[in-house]
Amino acid sequence: MTTSSSTPSQPQQNPPAEGTCTPTLPGFTCGLDATLRIIAGKWKPLILYFLAQGGPYRYGELRRAIRDVSDKMLIQQLKELESDGLVKRTDYKEIPPRVDYSLTPLGHSLAEALVPLCSWGTEHMDEVSRVFAKREGWGAKGR
Amino acid sequence: MTTSSSTPSQPQQNPPAEGTCTPTLPGFTCGLDATLRIIAGKWKPLILYFLAQGGPYRYGELRRAIRDVSDKMLIQQLKELESDGLVKRTDYKEIPPRVDYSLTPLGHSLAEALVPLCSWGTEHMDEVSRVFAKREGWGAKGR
DNA sequence: TGGGGCACTTACAAAAAGGTGCATACTTGT
DNA sequence: ACAAGTATGCACCTTTTTGTAAGTGCCCCA
């Protein structure tokens, strides 16, 4: 929870290059920091991703689509996303419970901002795969 | 570390929209997943960010620039970034140690892919701030 | 009546991530 | 001689995050 908010000192040596970020913000180092903290959570990107693809999803659909996620986790992340205003939960209050989830406009905009990351990952799949092969390969000691 | 690789079932109801991601990959659900796992780590985005801004930085410079990061953490993350091929470490093998870090081409491309996230965070700063105010505000029980 | 699905909730445990502080080997400044 | 700076390494501990298993209330179906 410590975010390096105090004394936002920037390096005064190298030229600050282009205005990629604006490091003069409330509790965050920069917008990137803020964004990453919002999508932090093992399943959140996936959720956003799925919701961005299809229309609203029912809870069970998501659950099955994401596969490997437990109820606890899915619900927890959905709740955070909801309270963060990225996802809208619609409870139809029917007798066998029926609920669905969709992106809010804010959520949509975030999902769009994620696209380049997505492409990067896809483009550099081979490098990335090697990296993780390495990390897991001789595991048991390294990390 | 489980990535929902097995049985990549996709929802067959809603139309798959545009080709935002390509969910047919080795160990990851999609490129986004891969990317996020590479930049996972409290300080990595910041490091990439700083390196993307100025030229190569010496260790101590980074340490002071990022502020609040401990040696252990900074070194650890730098090492991972290095072994992931995003950062290049140059050891001048001088008597008082001198080392500097810079982005590799791969690192640069990633940094560029991060720009939209950065902008998103900056643009939606107000919403994001509110979110975190809420999260921390009535803490102690919520999470 | 037993089984299954729906959308969750809760208590508890395991694992991962992060943090603190001390140590190293060598040099320069005072 | 001693403190300070350089770039790290290592041991230990706390916090955060994730996972597991079980349970809830209600309904439908055979």
Image (spheres, coloured by chain):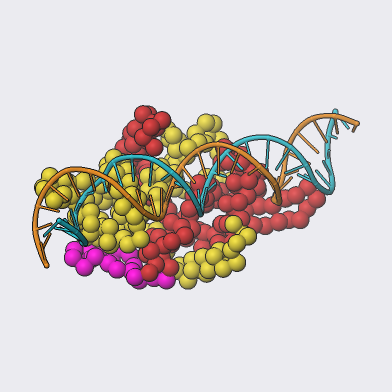
Chain colours: A red, B yellow, C orange, D cyan
Residue A10's quadrant in the figure?
bottom left
Residue A61's quadrant in the figure?
top right
Q: How many marks?
A: 0
Can residue B45 be seen from the camera position used here? no
Kindly identify the residue that appears in the image at 54 percent across and 31 percent down.
B7
Q: Position of residue C7 (x, y in %)?
A: 70, 49
- In the displayed structure, A121 sits above or below A21; it is above
Is B92 left or right of D20, judged from the image as shown?
A: left
Q: Which residues are magenta?
A: A7-26
> Is residue A15 highlighted in magenta?
yes
Q: Position of residue A94 (x, y in %)?
A: 78, 53
Q: Nearer the viewer, residue B74 or A30?
A: B74
Kindly identify the residue that appears in the image at 26 percent across and 57 percent down.
B62
Kindly identify the residue that appears in the image at 78 percent across and 47 percent down.
A96
Q: Nearer the viewer, residue A78 or B41?
A: B41
> Is residue A59 highlighted in magenta?
no
> In what quadrant of the picture does the C terminus of chain B appear?
bottom right
- In the displayed structure, B47 sits above or below A14; it is above
- In the displayed structure, A61 sits above or below C2; it is below
Q: Position of residue B6 (x, y in %)?
A: 52, 31
Can residue B34 be seen from the camera position used here? yes
Q: Nearer the viewer, residue B139 or B127?
A: B139
Q: Dominant secondary structure of the magenta stretch? A: loop
Q: Position of residue A40 (x, y in %)?
A: 48, 53
Is C8 left or right of C13, judged from the image as shown?
A: right
Q: Nearer the viewer, residue D1 or B84?
A: D1
Kindly identify the residue that appears in the image at 36 percent across and 35 percent down.
A142
